[in-house]
Amino acid sequence: MNEIAKPSIEDVGPAGETSLLETLPRLKEAWTPSSKVVRFDNEPLKLDSGQQLPSFQVAYETWGTLNEDKSNAILVCHALTGDQYVVGKNPVTGKPGWWETLIGPGKAIDTDKFFIICANILGGCMGTTGPASLNPKTGRPYGLAFPVITISDMVNAQVRLIDHLGIGQLFAVIGGSMGGMQVLDWAVRHKDRVFAAMPIATAARHSSQNIAFHEVGRQAVMADPDWCRGDYFEHGRVPEKGLGVARMAAHITYLSEEALHHKFGRNLQNRDERTFSFDADFQVESYLRHQGSTFVDRFDANAYLYITRAMDYFDIAAEHGNFLANAFRGTRTRFLVVSFTSDWLYPTRESRHIVRALNAVAANVSFVEIESNKGHDAFLLDEPEFFASVAGFINAAAQHRGLQT
Amino acid sequence: MSALRRASNIQASTRPDHLLIAEMVAKGARVLDVGCGDGALLQLLGEEKGVDARGIEIEREKVNACVARGLSVIQGDADNDLADYPDDAFDYAILSLTIQATRRPKTVLENLLRIGRRAIVSFPNFGHWKVRGGLLINGRMPVTDNLPESWYETPNAHLCTIYDFADLVKSIEAEVEDAFSFNARGKRLGIKQSIWLQNLLGEKAVFLLKRR
């Protein structure tokens, strides 16, 4: 195991790989991320499928200072298309970090008080091992040779990072959407290592509707001739159209009808009349096309397949006699469960289901439903009531942990 | 003035019925406050008795305000959410001035005594002379300081007198460890007064109950 601060392209792979890298610059972040990265060489990661990764790496970023007794660490778990760049300028996209609304100096989660860690998930494409990484057996990108992974596998990779950082118990594990699933997995399988947990806009299992939407996205990717049965890198191609459509469909599920109506209505895009064609006449069409095309610049199509699959397989109760409360038995973690009124992808009833299970084991749980018309994406946006709840919960938990706040 | 208020720096704005309830709670206990409102009682119990305090509140804005204050509160209500908790989860389950607004007070009380080793229940006394007078003299549903809403606006669905509540306690075979009535300023009625007088003169009542 060795820490690589800023790897250079030359460090990666056997000679000759550089050519692949030159044709497809998007592989650069997958192989040699701009963030910190730790390699676990010949330290296999056992997977739920029964397979294992003989070696793997975890790309991560940190903010703030770890205190002397390592008791102020907060692990942030990112969502499906997120990455490790929570705060500050994202070196890949040049955009601000994805959770700057919530985290930063003087924010609800204050980087002046806490040590924040965020790792790219296993199966991702921003530096942690995933289908775009090199398969040590072939020296070529894994593609579909990458084993199917689960949320627990992602968490197990994070556990290795936390071990590497020498942190025993995390002060908090927080995340929204798929990040919230990882939070729940941490709280269930690593009870003693999580002092406080914040599953946000999430569910303890993927619903049939959630799986259905994901299947639409995967089929869009796989129907693209440029997908080449997953070997598109080898053919110097990228299934941009398929991945773009997948993103467009998914993006609708992140918003609400009200938010779409409010933002676009039936307004036409840069024209006064309908064109009687299949151009993007409507602003909402143009917006979705833009969402699709910018997404394919930063995301790997195979990673999208693998990660959505992991979410579909997520079902905590199934592993505990179909009784969710069993999963939380014996927990001493303090929970804050958060939902948003207009989130129809992970609606409030899913959060309430988690709360009921926690109540059934008399766990210490707070639960807030935040009024918002912004849909599922609300957890990433400016929601002052949400921030106030998070700050109240985190600071009270810090007091119970004996941290200076 | 209560012993608790004398002994500490509690603000004068603290609700008198909260002080009376707090006096019944042992230090360091596990407490569930059902219908915790803005969390004032939870905060009082946390600060003065060092309890592990949890709350349930039906109104979203109040829940969010509680959590923003660092209290462990969930959105829910007595009728729907008590059934989830396991037996003996708490030392005390508190229902402060809420039972009259529940749909099924008997089930709620049974649940309180299942999940709490003890239950503390306070309620507005419908046997108070002002209430009786309102109906007897005016022939109208009483509107008093204690019951300020008109019949068509009040959330109270199941009002009762001290006698009525005592009957309910008897019917579910619970044991009364302590019970008294008090007025708006939190002044307890003299202990020697009969139940008949308490039921006539007490604006509110609080019962400390235990499973038999």
Image (cartoon, grey):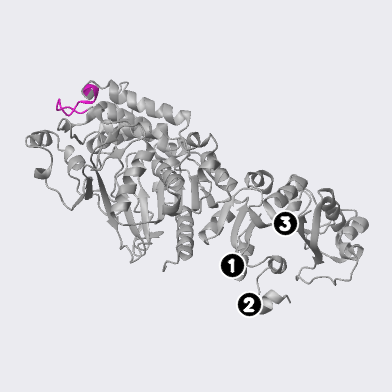
To which quarter of the image does residue A65 belong? bottom left
Callout 2 crowding tier (Cα within 10 Å): few <14, some 14–19, many ≥20: few
Residue A362 in the image, given as x and y percentages of width and height: 58, 50
Calculate the distance from the C-alpha at mark 3 to the C-alpha at mark 2: 25 Å
Marks 2 and 1 on same chain: yes
To which quarter of the image does residue B117 belong? bottom right
Left or right, A85 with reference to B154: left
Q: Which residue is mark 1?
A: B50
Residue A370 in the image, given as x and y percentages of width and height: 50, 48
Which is closer to the viewer, label 3 or label 2? 3
Residue ID at (77%, 47%): B106
**Magenta stretch prevailing secondary structure:** loop
Q: Which residue is mark 2?
A: B8
To which quarter of the image does residue A222 belong? top left
**Residue type at numbered disc 2:** Ser
- Of the numbered discs 3 and 2, the one sitting upstream in the chain is 2
Foreground residue among A222 and B171: B171
Report if residue A163 lies within the magenta region.
no
Highlighted magenta segment, given as a residue range: A228-238
- Of the numbered discs 1 and 3, the one sitting upstream in the chain is 1
Which of the labelled discs sits on residue A164, or is there none? none
**Residue type at numbered disc 3:** Ala
Counting every numbered tag in the picture gives 3
Q: Does A203 appear above or below A170?
A: above
Q: Which residue is mark 3?
A: B119
Chain bearing tag 2 is B
Residue A142 in the image, given as x and y percentages of width and height: 21, 31
Residue ID at (41%, 31%): A312
